Image (cartoon, helix red, strand yellow):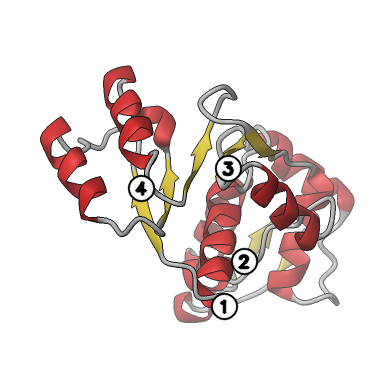
Amino acid sequence: MVEIKVIARNNPFRVDRVQTVRYRLPFSRDHLYLRLESLNYRAAIVGPEGSGKTTLLYDIFRQLRGAGIRVYMLRMHADDQFLTKRETKALFRSLEQDCLVFFDGADHLTSSLWKLVLRESGRLRGLIITSHQPGLLPTLIETETTPELLQGIVRDLLGSETDFTEQEAQRLFSACSGNIRDALRLLYDNFAEGSGVVG
């Protein structure tokens, strides 16, 4: 076990620190953007809960915004009430034609609202979404997690000298059913409570 005493404001697993961790692609970022372009900027990032879909979506959002592309972000959780059909139409029609829309959690929409989003986004530059299942749009990438990925993220946050072992990563990964987000929340809670126990 790794034991580190910290106070909450110095918690290495606090949200603002975790958000600095970039999604680890299995290929180059150039390849990702070339694939996105080949899909005419209409694509889905697909994967299970806590596998990095939102992290990658925001990476792409920031990259393209930094390149001067007009972007707009929508986000929906399972329990959220989305816009009405009238509000959805008004929103999409208020966007400039060269705007690229990012939609985190698009698979939480009803089928009729999703059809409306597809129709209304058709005149825009593109639509990039996250989804738990493939099929809403062509798949840009399928996200997945491994104990090695979790270990690498923990080492990034604690420093390369940490002795967070492969066995501890495997135990934590299994305890959280492969959900990296849940694993990092558990680590945050351990540190916030002062137990300082990782693994």
- Sequence-earlier tag: 1 or 4: 1
Residue 64 point in image, percent of width and height: 55, 67
Give the amino acid type for the residue marked by disc 2 in the picture: Gly
- Sequence-earlier tag: 3 or 1: 1
Q: Nearer the viewer, residue 27 or 35?
A: 35
At label 3, counting other C-alpha atoms closer than 10 Å, the crowd grade (few under 14, some 14-19, many 20 or more) is: many
Give the amino acid type for the residue marked by disc 1 in the picture: Val
- Left or right of 29? Residue 46 is left
Give the amino acid type for the residue marked by disc 3 in the picture: Gly
Q: Using the image, determine if residue 105 lies above or below residue 94.
A: above
Q: Which residue is mark 1?
A: 6
At label 4, counting other C-alpha atoms closer than 10 Å, the crowd grade (few under 14, some 14-19, many 20 or more) is: some
- Sequence-earlier tag: 2 or 1: 1
Q: Which residue is mark 2?
A: 196
Q: Closer to the camera: disc 3 or disc 1? A: 3
Is any atom of residue 168 visible in this view?
no
Secondary element at tag 4: strand
Q: At 61% across and 48% down in the image, what residue appears?
A: 52
Q: Which residue is mark 4?
A: 75
Query: For residue 144, what is the image quadrant?
Result: top right
Residue 113 point in image, percent of width and height: 27, 26
Badge 4 vs badge 2, beta-carbon distance below 8 Å: no
Give the amino acid type for the residue marked by disc 4 in the picture: Arg
Q: Nearer the viewer, residue 88 or 79?
A: 88
Secondary element at tag 1: loop
- Sequence-earlier tag: 4 or 3: 3
- What's the mark number on residue 65? none
Label 3, label 1: how far apart the Cα atoms are: 25 Å
- What's the mark number on residue 50? 3
